[in-house]
Image (cartoon, rainbow, N blue to C red):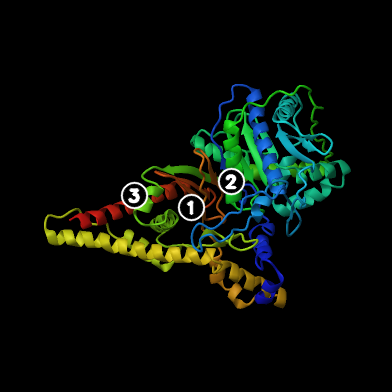
Amino acid sequence: MLLERQKEMNNWVRDWWLDDMYLKVRLPLPINSNPGMVFPRRHFAKMDEVADLAALYIDDLLDYKEMLERGELPQERATSREKGQPLCMEQFYHLLGVCRIPEVGKDRLELPQPSSGNVDSEELVIVACRNYFYPIPIKATDRGRLTAGEMQAQLLHVLVDAAGAPPAPRVGLLTSMNRDQWAMAREQLIRDDNNRGNLELISRALCLVCLDEAGGDRGDVDADTNALLRAMHGAGTRYHSANRWFDKTVQLIISSDGTVGMCYEHSPAEGVAVIRLAERALARAEVSDRPTPPPVLLPAPQAMKWNLTPDLMKTIDTAAREIDRNISDLDLRVYTYRGYGREYMKSCRTSPDVYIQLALQYAYYKMYGHLVSTYESASLRRFRGGRVDNIRAAHSAALAWARAMCAADTPPPPEDDSQKKVSFNLYGKKLELFQEAARKQTAIMEANILGHGIDNHLLGLREAAREHYGELPPLFTDPTYGQMIQFKLSTSQVATTVDGTFMGYGAVVPDGYGCSYNPKKDSVIFCISSFTSSNITSTEDFQQSLEEALNSMKLMFQNQNRKVEN
């Protein structure tokens, strides 16, 4: 059945994978699905500077969209493993103007229609400020696109208008709900023509620009962690969580206190496309002149008006309680390990990604005495429409090495040569097991990116069986299969090039960890998450175990080097 499906489709697994990974998942998007991305902190001396930066970002996103419409996006190619092979660029076209629409049982994606190179199509952005939503046309067929200065004037009006307005209805909180609950609330909303028109504008807008007020930082965590929390969920209903539309693929966030970042809805694209978009906008904003004030002011943007029934108001109150409860349950830390970075890992003749994945296995084993199913995304862009498969780092070779590393500590350096040999042999055995685990990890990674991973294949067999038989064979109802797809360690390498940028996300199971990592030259940025409601996990303890693991690994290599020198 899969072979027949392969003949008929460009990508036989993508639709099933998208449903399974995102569209059929009913959990709320904030924390559970949408990653947050932090940009370098800014200092705004006055309100105009907030509008300046937002205008420059919007201007660049519009440039990017027009570049896509002209078909000028450079073709990327693989840099290793079948080097030079072209990579699918589809995800880059699924960022701007995209929105996830809630429906009972399964959501759908609204993608922009192909423009056939028409760069004169109308474009708008939605600006969120103090929980109001302002549609701003940034390009029209009759007058062309706004200049950065005209956008700045429109944004400045929004900041002033929202500041003087009464409290807004917190409609944005509906997008933070369980997907079925939000789908039912949306059905109530669109019974009103005005509300339906608002939702259509939000859906087709280029992106959402969230202009936040100051506030929302917690006193018990550092600045990096606070910035990521605000990017992921808005810091709660007392602060910015209602000033969001979590269904929108790209939400740029600019706060008057200098916190800047992005929240993105994950289903249309992987992080590599989002980071490319964001870092381009960041780089261009750094070198651009301040937007020039327009000679003539355009008509001022008007905030959306919503017609809300008493039932919808109650639903919004429920949504507020739920997101605040979910936010209080999130245990997240941004942790920068400064002992060494990717250059040292390379000097150990190990891929930094492989090195860090094994460090995560070692850290988990140190805490719990066993390994668990681990998810690491593997890009399938070598295939048309390819998204990801799963590099499984919890294998027998990793277990053997982690067990050896956690064995009794090597005795202190003895006096006689025979004891020294025993000491060196212990380190030599650990290094030998590490190298075997690294070879296994590399082989699994290569198999995945070349299309030979197991998870997508098993998913295809499961869904084909479901469609053909109406029920699942015992393979997919066995407890072992259930355990295999419960990812208590959900990880990914999220590399950025701009200093001060990083991305993080929540754990994917109640008793698990989420851990993104960003290898820098001499450090590694980890974003570690778990849930306080679990009595099994602890983000602080995992951070400590990870630090100890990375230190021990360096000691392992140093002792081997001493042996060579002797």
Residue 276 got which mark? 2
Residue 542 seen in the current view: yes
Q: Is residue 336 above or below residue 42?
A: below
Disc 1 target residue: 537
Disc 3 target residue: 551
Image position of 284 (left or right of 147): left
Label 3 to label 2: alpha-carbon separation: 32 Å
Say which amino acid is labelled 2: Arg
Picture coordinates of residue 505, whole percent (x, y): 56, 48
Which one is in front, 338 or 153?
A: 153
Image position of 269 (left or right of 546): right
At 79% from the left edge and 32% from the top edge, which residue is drawn? 303
Picture coordinates of residue 87, whole percent (x, y): 59, 58
Q: Quadrant of the N terminus?
A: bottom right
As helix, strand or loop, the secondary structure at mark 2 comes to helix
At 39% from the left edge and 43% from the top edge, which residue is drawn? 522
As helix, strand or loop, the secondary structure at mark 1 comes to loop
Label 3 to label 1: alpha-carbon separation: 22 Å
Q: Contact, CB < 8 Å: mark 3 with mark 2?
A: no
As helix, strand or loop, the secondary structure at mark 3 comes to helix
Say which amino acid is labelled 1: Thr
